[in-house]
Amino acid sequence: MRLNNVLVFLSSIGAASARYASNLNYGSPSAYHPFLGISLYKVVRRHDETVRSIDASALNFTHGVASGDPYANSVILWTRCSPEYDNDRSNVTVSGTVPLFNHDTQEYVRVSTAPVCVNYNVATDREMENIVTYGQAFTSSDIDYTIKVEATGLQPFTQYYYQFVVCDSTNASPVGRTKTAPAPEDDVSEVSVAVYSCSNYPFGFFNAFGNPARKDSVDYVLHLGDFIYEYAEGAYGWGWSIDRVSQPNKELHTLYDYRKRHASYRADLDSILSFASYAWIPVWDDHEVGDNTYRDGMSAQNNTEDSFIQDDVEYGGAGIAFDQRKMNAVRAYFEWMPIRQVEMDDNLRIWRSFSLGNLVDIIMLDTRQYDRSITDLYWNTEYIHEIQGDAGRSLMGSRQENWFYNQLSKSKARGAAWRLIGSQIVFSRLNQSTAGGVDDPYNMDAWDGYQANRNRTFKHLYDNNITNNIVMAGDSHMSWVSDLVWLGEHDYDTETGAGSIGVEFAGSAVSSPCPRGQNITIAEANEKSAALVAGNRELLWQDVYYRGYYELTIAQDGVQARYYGVPTVVQRTPYEVSLANFTVERDANAVKRPIAGGVVESGAVKGGRVVQTNLTYDTATGEYKVHNLSTFGYNQTVF
């Protein structure tokens, strides 16, 4: 080949690569580990550039649209445009010498031979007439036909609409809505967010996702993790009874498995609605990989040879080591969620922060996957109880932990009014013993199992007088509201909240059941809540019964928290019940008394009472009705 022909060839490769590179999903989840991405050189070489795209009429936007990780001048946009509804299987191992996750073995796998070309437009109106920015991206089977782009050149704290269109056609996606973040220096009076965790497909419908969209009540969505679960049907959830068997119907191990499970969950109609309505800021918990994960394994598998063999026999692991399994999960999460490739120092970093004007800094932690010390794996509970106070134990690892403390200090130094801290697991001390003086932590897999790490966090807050902190938590499948107080080190007045350094709002699950009883009445559930509130000085309200979510309205002078329960998850409905409302005034660092105004719908409140009204709001029509819960056919936790 002559030199000029070589140069022309290389030039064409470079130009084509640029069109692929605009799709962020070809990149590695880690900026510093590019080998975890897809080789654009090989993708371009494989594709026939004379074929602009697969026939537009054969393509479908299979899962709507999504947006996320808003910055002041940009936001991530996501869709999937595929010639088929199934997911890519090009990670199938065909021999013992072929790496599982290897797109070099193209002769063995089914891959696309032509790119899918998609244009995207961003406008100020839903009719997509006033377009402010646009672009083009390619996708292919290599990344499961997902498309993730960064729309740039936008204005701060501004609502936009966006749409994807197959190139040279009228085949268009639904129109999505998103909003950029305020600039860090902007004077912002109010921001509202919906906070979720633990959406389990076979246990029920994701009604809670859709309700804020129908109400149009928030600016952004925060998901604290457990967006998917890794189990086979019947292992944790019985989807057959409500026609919600998640796919694939097996324990997740391969890249295909995790892709397929994300696709299954994202097909829920209220999931589609929420992603299309709001910019999401998500983070993973444990089940995006597996149950009770830590840096070297999970409850069902670790990196030992015995575990490798046992997992292969009992769960159909197909000879996959835990580290490979985790990498498959991370790759699928990166492809399917509208998140950025932040300045990652390794392939597992998802912890990041967002500054919303001078009002609030959102700090999203990873207390599960990054560098977590061994946790409660069910067979070692007593051992974890013995070492819970070990100074060497960390939920986050030293790098993330130091980053966290620096973020808190920087937030105070820049004058942000509030700090929202996203923690997958409950931060506050939770003693479940009813015997006075007996320490029986509720969950050794939460911060209770890492007491030195919690104490270091408290010490940084108290020593540096970093106030107005709001911790957000999920994972427990119950609702909790607590003052943040370092008991034993600082005085605390339960009557006034004096001595607290902030407040924790922990939410129930979108659909996952309560571990304290799936077949109990609301009266029995409230008795359990009352015992927990009585046994913990700083625990102010607790609810066992309802699935749901909460909304936070953050203003310069205070934070309002509104908890909502969904009456059922075994049917798709737009209904919700207002459970309790809380106020945190600026610089008070505690929930305003009387707590929740002294009255809540469900659970137990310190110094107050439960008044069950069953007043149910229809988020689709705006009407209120009084319902007997039995009218829905099932208690929402019975399956």
Image: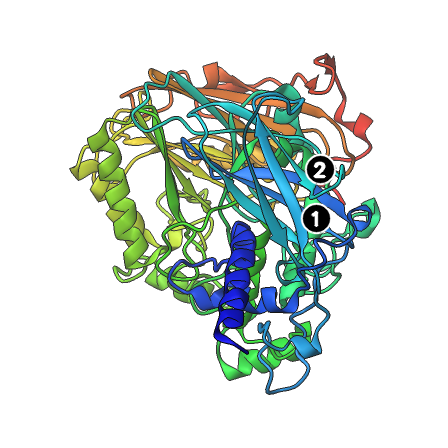
Image position of 411 with respect to 233: above or below: above
Which secondary structure, mark 1? strand
Residue 406 is situated, as x and y percent measured from the top left of the image, at 24, 44
Comparing 291 with 289, the one in front is 289
Dot label at residue 260: none
The answer to which quarter of the image holds residue 393 is bottom left
Residue 563 is situated, as x and y percent measured from the top left of the image, at 54, 26
Comparing 269 with 424, the one in front is 269
The reply to whether residue 635 is visible in this rendering is yes
Which secondary structure, mark 2? loop
Q: Which residue is mark 1?
A: 81
Comparing 257 with 59, the one in front is 59
From the viewer's perspective, is 268 left or right of 433? right
Query: In this figure, which colouring scheme has been used for the structure?
Result: rainbow
Q: Which quadrant of the figure contains the C terminus?
A: top right
- How far is disc 2 from disc 1 in space, using C-alphas? 9 Å
From the viewer's perspective, is 416 left or right of 243? left
Image position of 297 with respect to 438: above or below: below
Q: Residue at x 77, y 33 (%)?
A: 572
Q: Which quadrant of the figure contains the N terminus?
A: bottom right
- Can you name the residue that lies furthest to the left here? 463
Q: Residue at x 56, y 52 (%)?
A: 19
Disc tally is 2
Q: Residue at x 54, y 70 (%)?
A: 5
Mark 2 residue crowding within 10 angstroms, few (<14) / some (14–19) / many (20+)? many
Earlier residue among tags 2 and 1: 1
Mark 1 residue crowding within 10 angstroms, few (<14) / some (14–19) / many (20+)? many
Comparing 91 with 12, the one in front is 12
Residue 272 is situated, as x and y percent measured from the top left of the image, at 68, 37
What amino acid is labelled 2 in the image?
A: Ser
Q: Which residue is mark 2?
A: 173
What amino acid is labelled 1 in the image?
A: Cys
